[in-house]
Image (tube, grey):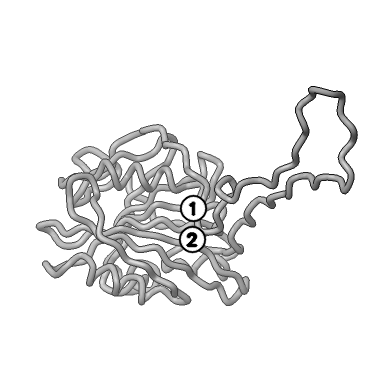
C-alpha cells in the first residue's frame, strides 16, 4: 500500500536534503593519537648482561589518516526492492539492508508538491527508512526521463540541491552496470552546519535511476553506508 512521503518535524531542519531528510552536524572528530613515552635523561642502571631498555616513538604508519574514514561493516541482506510484488515498482531492483522499511512515494508527479518531489531533472519514487535500525535517514530512489548520460543527470541532481558543494564524481559499477557515483556536502543555513551525502546513478532503458543516501548528519550518514553499498553492489535491471 502506498503512503505519502513523510516529513519529520521540525520541517525547517529537515527539508534541506531536497525532499525530507536533513539536519546537519559537523563530521565526527578523529580519535587523538597519544605520543609514546619519552626516555628519561639518565636511564636507570641495569644489571650486567640484562638487555638495555629503549623508548621509541609510535610509527607514522600506525597513526590514523585524516583522509581515511573508519571501515564500515557489511550490512545484513533483507528484502528485495524494485521488482514485481515489492514495495516500489522501479526500473531497477536491489537488496535492502535488514529492517529498512521501504515505501512508494504517492503521487510524485503532483505539481503542488514539486518542491518536495523533484530535484533538478529527477523525481523521487521510493524511500527506505532507516529508523527501525536505530539510525535517522533515508535511502531514496529517483528517476529521470530521457536517454542522456547518467553522469549528466546526476550532476543536475546535485546542483539542484540547495547548499550542495565539494562534489567529487567517479566512474564505478552498480552491480554489473556502469555507474557514476558522487560524494558531496550540503550546508544547512538553519543549523549552520554541513553534512556529507552521496548518490550513484545508472542509465536504464526507462531513463536514469539515482539512488541517494542522506542522513540527519555526517555521523548518521557514515553509519548507514553499509546499507548504501549493499544496494549499489546488488543492483540490476528490472
Answer with left or right where residue 85 lies relative to residue 140: left
Residue 62's x, y, as percent? 58, 45
Residue 159's x, y, as percent? 36, 76
Quadrant where the image shows the C terminus = top left
User: Where is mark 2, residue-wise?
Assistant: 21
Indicate the secondary structure of the residue bearing disc 1: loop
**Mark 2 neighbour density, 10 Å: few (under 14) some (14–19) many (20 or more):** many
Q: Is there CB contact under 8 Å for labels 2 and 1?
A: yes
Q: Earlier in the sequence, mark 2 or mark 1?
A: 2
Answer with left or right where residue 206 lies relative to residue 212: left
User: Where is mark 1, residue-wise?
Assistant: 137
Residue 7's x, y, as percent? 49, 60
Answer with left or right where residue 193 lies relative to residue 45: left
Q: Is residue 182 above or below residue 83?
A: below
Quadrant where the image shows the N terminus = top left
- The residue sitting at 60% across, 63% down in the picture is 25
**Mark 1 neighbour density, 10 Å: few (under 14) some (14–19) many (20 or more):** many
Classify residue 87 by image quadrant. Answer: top left
Q: Is residue 11 above or below residue 53?
A: below
Amino acid at each position: 500500500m502506498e503512503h505519502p512521503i513523510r516529513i519529520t518535524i521540525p520541517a525547517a531542519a529537515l527539508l534541506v536534503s531536497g525532499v525530507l531528510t536533513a539536519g546537519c552536524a559537523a563530521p565526527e572528530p578523529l580519535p587523538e593519537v597519544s605520543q609514546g613515552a619519552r626516555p628519561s635523561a639518565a636511564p636507570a642502571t641495569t644489571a650486567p648482561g640484562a638487555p638495555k631498555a629503549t623508548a621509541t616513538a609510535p610509527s607514522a604508519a600506525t597513526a590514523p589518516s585524516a583522509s581515511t574514514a573508519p571501515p564500515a561493516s557489511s550490512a545484513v541482506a533483507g528484502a528485495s526492492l524494485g521488482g514485481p510484488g515489492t514495495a516500489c515498482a522501479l526500473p531497477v531492483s536491489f537488496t535492502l539492508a535488514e529492517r529498512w522499511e521501504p515505501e512508494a512515494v504517492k503521487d510524485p508527479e503532483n505539481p503542488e508538491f514539486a518542491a518536495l518531489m523533484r530535484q533538478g531533472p529527477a523525481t523521487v519514487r521510493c524511500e527506505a527508512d532507516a529508523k527501525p535500525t536505530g539510525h535517522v535517514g533515508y535511502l531514496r530512489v529517483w528517476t529521470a526521463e530521457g536517454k542522456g548520460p547518467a553522469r549528466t543527470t546526476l550532476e543536475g541532481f546535485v546542483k539542484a540541491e540547495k547548499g550542495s558543494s565539494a562534489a567529487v564524481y567517479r566512474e564505478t559499477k552498480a552491480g554489473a552496470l556502469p555507474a557514476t557515483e558522487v560524494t558531496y556536502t550540503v550546508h544547512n543555513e538553519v543549523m549552520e552546519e554541513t553534512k556529507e551525502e552521496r548518490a550513484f546513478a545508472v542509465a536504464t532503458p526507462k531513463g536514469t535511476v539515482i539512488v541517494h543516501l542522506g542522513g540527519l548528519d555526517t555521523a548518521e550518514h557514515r553509519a548507514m553506508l553499509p546499507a548504501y553499498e549493499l544496494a549499489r553492489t546488488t543492483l540490476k535491471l528490472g
